[in-house]
């Protein structure tokens, strides 16, 4: 199946700094990618839909100025957590669809200290 | 409001038995429903997709049923093995939408 690569897999940052997470579709082009957040023992919550060449669509309650999404090419979307706080600590996962099947990245464990 | 509910947070079964997981949804018109497996600290991995006009889908030891009247999908793993232990997530994609919504997942443990 198709491969989606997410980087980094783990990151620890200081409160107030920004962190960038990359999501790449390695062997297919993805006009749309999705960003999810997952808390322990909870489901994946869709944060935003990233559209190549246009602005991302954010879910209700997700601050677009805090979670900056850039989808500059058909194979790369980035999520930047700006001015991170400890409550932003979570598992972030991206996905890209090829046809009806979605492929997920490995996830990024963000810890803000 | 829209809901996707998976019947139990955790399910423990003995090796060799059939595991049955349930996914119920409310206020969705799904184009199709998918099941994923997620291991700790990893992203979900696609298992099976079933469309709204399909009743049943099989893949090796996996079987999925889809009842749009009951608004329910059942996911079966036959002849379960300890390696099947993981969290299983159901996900819906609604008609006219291209984003997926997930249930909370059921953590399956298969004991030898």
Image (cartoon, rainbow, N blue to C red):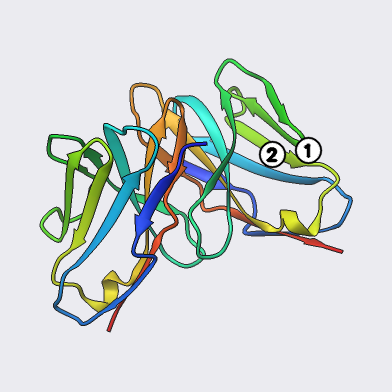
Q: Residues within 10 Å of mark 2 (few under 14, many from 20)?
A: many
Quadrant of the frame with the C terminus of chain B: bottom right
Quadrant of the frame with the N terminus of chain B: top left
Residue on which disc 2 sits: B75
Q: Is residue A111 left or right of residue B15?
A: left
Do the residues bearing badges 2 and 1 touch, measured as CB atoms within 8 Å?
no
The chain under label 1 reads: B
Q: Is residue A69 left or right of residue B24?
A: left
Image quarter for residue A88? bottom left
Residue A39 position, x and y percent, is 42, 65
Query: Distance from label 2 to label 1 (Cα)?
Result: 11 Å
Q: Nearer the viewer, residue B67 or A108?
A: A108
Q: Earlier in the sequence, mark 2 or mark 1?
A: 1
The chain under label 2 reads: B
SS at badge 1: loop
SS at badge 2: strand
Q: Residues within 10 Å of mark 1 (few under 14, many from 20)?
A: few
Residue A55 position, x and y percent, is 12, 39
Residue A22 position, x and y percent, is 28, 55
Of circles 2 and 1, which is in front?
A: 1
The residue drawn where x is 51% and y is 50% is B44
The residue drawn where x is 33% and y is 27% is B97
| Residue B110 visible here | yes
The residue drawn where x is 62% and y is 18% is B54
Residue B61 tag number: 1
Please, is residue A12 above or below residue B32 in the view?
Answer: below
| Residue A93 visible here | no
């Amino acid at each position: 199946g198709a491969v989606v690569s997410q980087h980094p897999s783990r990151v620890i940052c200081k409160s107030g700094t920004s962190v960038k997470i990359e999501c790449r579709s390695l062997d297919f082009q993805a006009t749309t990618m999705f960003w999810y957040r997952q808390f322990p023992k909870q489901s994946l919550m869709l944060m935003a839909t990233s559209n190549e060449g246009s602005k991302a669509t954010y879910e209700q309650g997700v601050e677009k100025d805090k979670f900056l999404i850039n989808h500059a090419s058909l194979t790369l979307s980035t999520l930047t957590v700006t001015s991170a706080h400890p409550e932003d600590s979570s598992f972030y996962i991206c996905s890209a669809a090829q046809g009806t099947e979605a492929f997920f990245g490995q996830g990024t464990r963000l810890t803000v200290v | 409001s829209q809901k996707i509910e998976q019947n139990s947070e955790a399910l423990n079964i003995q090796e060799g038995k059939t595991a049955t997981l349930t996914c119920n949804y409310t206020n969705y018109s799904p184009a199709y429903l998918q099941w994923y497996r997620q291991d700790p600290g990893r992203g979900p991995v696609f298992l099976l997709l079933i469309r709204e006009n399909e009743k049943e889908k099989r893949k090796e030891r996996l079987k999925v049923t889809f009842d749009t009247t009951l608004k329910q999908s059942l996911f079966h793993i036959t002849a379960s093995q300890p390696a099947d232990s993981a969290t299983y997530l159901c996900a819906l994609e609604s008609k006219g939408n291209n984003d997926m919504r997930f249930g909370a997942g059921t953590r399956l443990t298969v004991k030898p």
